[in-house]
Image: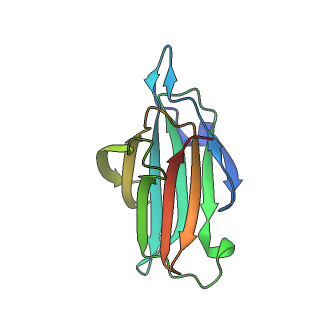
Amino acid sequence: MKDKKLDELKPIEITLDSKIDYKAKHPSFGRAEFQICPVFKRGYIRELFIYRKQQEARTFYHLDLESELEGSRINVFSITAWSHETDYPRIWRNFWCKEHKTISFEVYVPDNTDTIEFSFHFGNTLDVRFVKK
C-alpha cells in the first residue's frame, strides 16, 4: 500500500476518552501499524497525530491536548499495552517528521489487541495503550 499524501486524508478530532479500533492483521496488508507524532512546544506535548499504516485508511486522528487539558504539563509520553496478557507494541522505527517537526514513532500493534486508548495521569504523563476490548 502506498502512503497517501496528508492532504488526501480527512482529520478526525479525538479526545482522551476516544478509542481507535483496528484489526491487528489484514489479509492483504499484513500486521497493522500506526505512525504516532507527539508535537512538543516549549518542552510539553500539545498535540498528538496518529496515522494508520498498512491498513485501509482515509482518515487520521488528531488529539489537541492544549484545549483538552488546559494548562497541562505533559512531558512524559509512553506507548504501551495495558495488560500482562498482551504483548507490548513494537516500535520498529523512529524518524524526524517534517510535517509536524517532531520525532515520529512507527509502531506494530500487538497480536491480541484491537483498540487504542489514552490515559492521562500523574499530572504530566500521557499513555497511548494498545488493549483488547
Q: Answer left or right for 86 relative to 48.
A: left
The image shows residue 123 at horizontal and vertical percentages of 53, 81
Q: Residue 131: x percent and y percent?
A: 54, 45
Q: In the image shown, does 12 or 130 lie closer to the viewer?
A: 130
Quadrant housing the C terminus: top right
Residue positioned 39% across, 61% down in the render: 102
Question: Residue drawn 45% across and 45% down?
Answer: 35
Residue reaching furthest front? 85
**Could you say which quadrant of the image residue 87 lies in?**
top left
Quarter assignment of residue 121: bottom right
- Residue 24 image point, x, y percent: 50, 30
| Above or below, 45 relative to 78 | below
Q: Is residue 74 visible?
A: yes
The residue lying furthest to the bottom in this view is 71
In which image quadrant can residue 76 be found?
bottom left
Q: How is the image coloured?
A: rainbow
Q: How many marks on residues?
A: 0
Depth check: 81 or 19 in front? 81
25 to 114, vertically: above or below:
above
- Tell me if 81 is positioned left or right of 7 in this view: left
Residue at the top extreme of this rendering:
28
